[in-house]
Image (cartoon, helix red, strand yellow):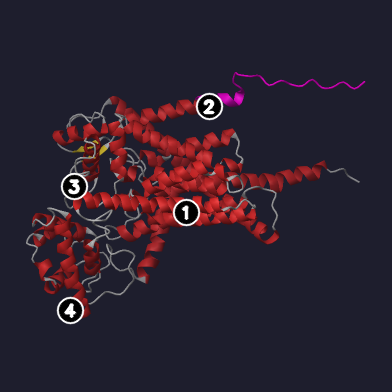
């Protein structure tokens, strides 16, 4: 008589062993909040165009919202307020309105972005342990402790986590193109919000656009191959770009209503931008203009060509203040000098007056190029705000970018916490506290015992990452090579025993190329300051690369393990299990 095996009933309620893993993960998450709250913050309240601008704009936005939008949304017009994106000030203002201290708000963003990444790559069929390991790997990434990046109250602090959000959302959509359309809708909505927020964090956000565009196109191709393509997918695919355009129009319209100029940024998109493009390309015939974009002689030539520019009474004095020991103003310092001088001459009382000034200067300089009074330098222009780029620049900066990339991957360069540094008066610190909701204390106040302990603990975490980096980097390289080989086997033989190889290869390749692109752009821009590859400026402007490399390590290593298990271990076991003759 056949006896049926008793059916095992699953217990309802209660926790299994796998669920207990959540306990240490939760504890480590809470501990991350603790480390953030007692972190040693860096306050630079006198950086008029940088840190101070972010906080001042946040204060104005907060007041604008509280007043029912009846005040000018960024306060009185000045050479600073429309010179940089508003995403970070909005972030500060939002959480300030909610009375959430900045360290908690910042850590909420970090935790949220890490969770989103783990959820985004679930189609890769990773077990729970691996998912939580990835979450903690990103949560405690050294970039989150970097004194010049995350500990500074400035927009670059949130950039790595914004990158994780954007990349995760569009990666999630791509990996779910074989499912029903509704499975991608939440990711599309979050992708729209995060992409628009990221775009206006900095003025050079275009470096992430290739990844977003290419992964979107690949997703549509994937849906065609999986026979899940529909016009709804087309609409969802273009929605983030439509939203970005809508935000641009709204942003510009608000500026038009408040200040009389239809633009998102009067430094990057106005007659001032055109003027800087014309000044940056002047060939003075004498000066080595690799690091000096607008030399003193170029300025004199511009004066002769433009009576309006020559009429700025304070420009020579302000120019003197940004010169170095050689008597030249390097890089983009002249652009800030010109804005400051124009403000001191009264041209920044409103945007209409400012635009009229630079429109006239632009007309005079353009005519000077036409009649030969001014000669343009050779090279091509990546932006009006930088000097023309030559092929020699591209070659030199490529090599330099490889060095910076190596320092990020192997050394987590500049990722350490230092003692609290408050460069502000007591009055300035008090004003910042109204936005940040943290006790900065007196400027002369020493570091507390708790802050010192947190600093030491944070640096030990960073050091542990630096130690394992020498293991993770080779594993990432091996995993990527295996992914590449497997991807080519699929392309040419159309077979694979491992799922999601091609998508993983496209994603990891895209992430690596995007990380290098950000680093390359940073090197191209920062090389006028220094040619020392360990200078913190390179890593300050490449903060998104830390996040992209960390995500790439997660994907390439786990997919490499899957390929090894499937191709070598499982096959060997299958052969061993075959009956012998």
| Image coordinates for residue 532, horizontal then vertical, percent | 32, 56
Q: Earlier in the sequence, mark 4 or mark 3?
A: 3
Instruction: Classify mark 4: residues with Cα within 10 Å, few (<14), some (14-19) or many (20+).
Output: some
Q: Earlier in the sequence, mark 4 or mark 1?
A: 1
Residue position for label 4: 373
Closer to us: 63 or 422: 63
Q: Earlier in the sequence, mark 2 or mark 3?
A: 2
Q: Distance from label 3 to label 1 (Cα)?
A: 38 Å
Q: Is residue 279 magenta?
A: no
Q: Secondary structure at mark 2?
A: helix
Chief secondary structure of the magenta portion: loop
Q: Distance from label 2 to label 3 (Cα)?
A: 45 Å
Query: Is the N terminus in the top left, top right, bottom left or bottom right quadrant?
Result: top right
Q: Which numbered circle lies on residue 314?
A: none
Residue position for label 1: 238
At 9% from the left and 63% from the top, the residue drawn is: 312
Q: Which numbered circle lies on residue 48?
A: 3
Identity of the residue furthest to the right in this view: 1
Q: Distance from label 4 to label 2 (Cα)?
A: 71 Å
Q: Secondary structure at mark 4?
A: loop
Q: Earlier in the sequence, mark 3 or mark 1?
A: 3
Q: Secondary structure at mark 1?
A: helix
Residues in magenta?
1-23
């Amino acid at each position: 008589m056949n006896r049926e095996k008793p059916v095992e009933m699953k217990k309802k309620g209660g926790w299994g062993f796998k669920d207990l893993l959540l306990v240490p993960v939760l504890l480590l998450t809470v501990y991350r909040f603790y480390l953030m709250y007692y972190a040693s913050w860096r306050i630079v309240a006198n950086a008029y165009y940088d840190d101070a601008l972010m906080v001042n704009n946040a204060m104005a936005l907060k007041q604008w919202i509280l007043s029912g939008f009846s005040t000018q949304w960024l306060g009185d017009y000045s050479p600073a307020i429309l010179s940089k994106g508003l995403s970070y000030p909005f972030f500060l203002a939002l959480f300030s309105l909610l009375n959430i201290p900045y360290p908690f708000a910042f850590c909420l963003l970090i935790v949220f972005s890490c969770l989103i990444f783990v959820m985004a790559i679930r189609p890769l069929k990773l077990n729970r342990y691996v998912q939580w390991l990835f979450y903690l790997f990103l949560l405690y990434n050294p970039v989150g402790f970097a004194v010049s990046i995350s500990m500074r109250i400035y927009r670059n602090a949130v950039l790595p986590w914004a990158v994780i959000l954007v990349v995760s959302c569009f990666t999630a959509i791509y990996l779910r193109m074989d499912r029903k359309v509704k499975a991608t809708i939440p990711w599309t909505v979050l992708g729209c919000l995060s992409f628009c927020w990221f775009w206006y964090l900095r003025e050079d956000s275009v470096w992430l656009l290739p990844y977003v565009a290419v992964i979107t196109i690949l997703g549509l191709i994937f849906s065609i191959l999986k026979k899940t393509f529909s016009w709804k997918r087309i609409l969802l695919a273009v929605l983030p770009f439509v939203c970005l355009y809508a935000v641009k129009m709204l942003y510009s319209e608000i500026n038009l209503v408040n200040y009389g100029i239809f633009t998102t940024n009067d430094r990057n998109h106005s007659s001032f931008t055109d003027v800087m493009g014309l000044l940056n390309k002047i060939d003075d015939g004498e000066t080595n203009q690799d690091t000096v974009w607008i030399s003193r002689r170029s300025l004199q030539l511009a004066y002769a060509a433009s009576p309006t520019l020559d009429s700025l009474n304070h420009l020579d004095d302000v120019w003197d203040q940004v010169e170095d020991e050689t008597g030249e103003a390097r890089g983009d310092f002249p652009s800030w000098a010109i804005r400051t001088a124009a403000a001191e001459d009264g041209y920044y009382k409103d945007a209409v007056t400012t635009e009229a000034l630079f429109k006239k200067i632009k007309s005079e300089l353009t005519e000077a190029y036409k009649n030969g009074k001014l000669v343009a330098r050779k090279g091509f222009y990546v932006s009006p705000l930088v000097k023309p780029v030559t092929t020699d620049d591209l070659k030199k900066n490529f090599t330099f970018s490889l060095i910076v990339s190596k320092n990020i991957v192997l050394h987590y360069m500049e990722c350490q916490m230092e003692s609290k540094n408050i460069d502000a008066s007591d009055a300035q610190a008090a004003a910042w506290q109204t936005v940040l909701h943290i006790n900065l204390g007196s400027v002369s106040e020493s570091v507390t015992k708790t802050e010192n302990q947190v600093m030491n603990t944070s640096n030990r975490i960073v050091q542990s990452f630096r130690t394992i980096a020498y293991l993770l980097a080779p594993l990432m390289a091996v995993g990527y090579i295996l992914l590449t080989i497997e991807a080519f086997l699929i392309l040419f033989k159309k077979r694979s025993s491992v799922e999601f190889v091609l998508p993983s290869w496209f994603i990891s390749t895209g992430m690596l190329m995007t990380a290098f692109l950000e680093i390359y752009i940073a090197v191209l821009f920062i090389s006028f300051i220094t040619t020392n590859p360990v200078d913190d400026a390179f890593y300050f402007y490449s903060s998104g690369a830390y996040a992209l490399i960390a995500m790439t390590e997660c994907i390439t290593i786990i997919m490499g393990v899957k390929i090894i298990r499937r191709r070598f271990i499982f096959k060997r076991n299958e052969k061993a299990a075959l009956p012998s003759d």
